[in-house]
Image: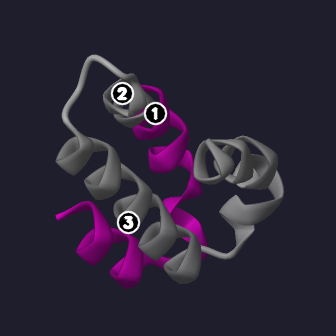
């Protein structure tokens, strides 16, 4: 759903991502299964693809998640 809405709204999705991102990031912790972490990384990747404006705000955080 998040990916579809970001695709429909493009860069206008950024305010919504600002509210959703902290909730999604919770699922990146070690206490969550690997499938949850992969889902969040994939979701954020697709959102950034659909909402390029998000890259300038979240790239550093996102890159550290990928590297871990």
**Residue 13 counted in the magenta span:** yes
The residue that appears at 27% across and 56% down in the rendered structure is 39
Q: Residue at x 23, y 26 (%)?
A: 32
- The reply to whether the C-beta atoms of the residues labelled 2 and 1 are less than 8 Å apart is yes
Can you give x and y, in whole percent of width and height, for residue 38 in the image?
32, 55
Name the secondary structure under disc 3: helix
Q: Residues within 10 Å of mark 3 (few under 14, many from 20)?
A: few
**Viewed as shown, does residue 7 lie left or right of 5?**
right
Q: CA distance from mark 2 to mark 1?
A: 8 Å
Mark 3 → mark 2, Cα distance in angstroms: 15 Å
Q: CA distance from mark 3 to mark 1?
A: 18 Å
Residue at image mark 2: 23
Q: Is residue 53 left or right of residue 11?
A: right
Which of the labelled discs sits on residue 42, or is there none? 3
As helix, strand or loop, the secondary structure at mark 1 comes to helix
Residue 53 or 55: which is nearer the viewer? 55
Q: Which residues are magenta?
A: 1-22
Percent coordinates x, y for residue 57 in the rendering: 78, 49
Give SS at disc 2: helix
At 68% from the left edge and 76% from the top edge, which residue is drawn?
A: 52
Estimate the x, y position of residue 19 in percent, counting from the top left.
46, 33
Q: Residue at x 55, y 67 (%)?
A: 12
Helix, strand or loop for the magenta stretch, by majority: helix
In which quarter of the view is residue 20 placed?
Answer: top left
Q: Which residue is mark 1?
A: 19
């Amino acid at each position: 759903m998040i990916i579809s809405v970001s695709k429909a709204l493009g860069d206008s999705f950024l305010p919504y991502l600002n509210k959703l991102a902290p909730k999604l990031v919770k699922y990146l912790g070690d206490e969550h299964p690997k499938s949850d972490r992969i889902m969040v990384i994939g979701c954020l990747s697709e959102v950034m693809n659909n909402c390029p404006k998000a890259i300038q705000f979240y790239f550093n955080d996102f890159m550290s998640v990928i590297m871990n």
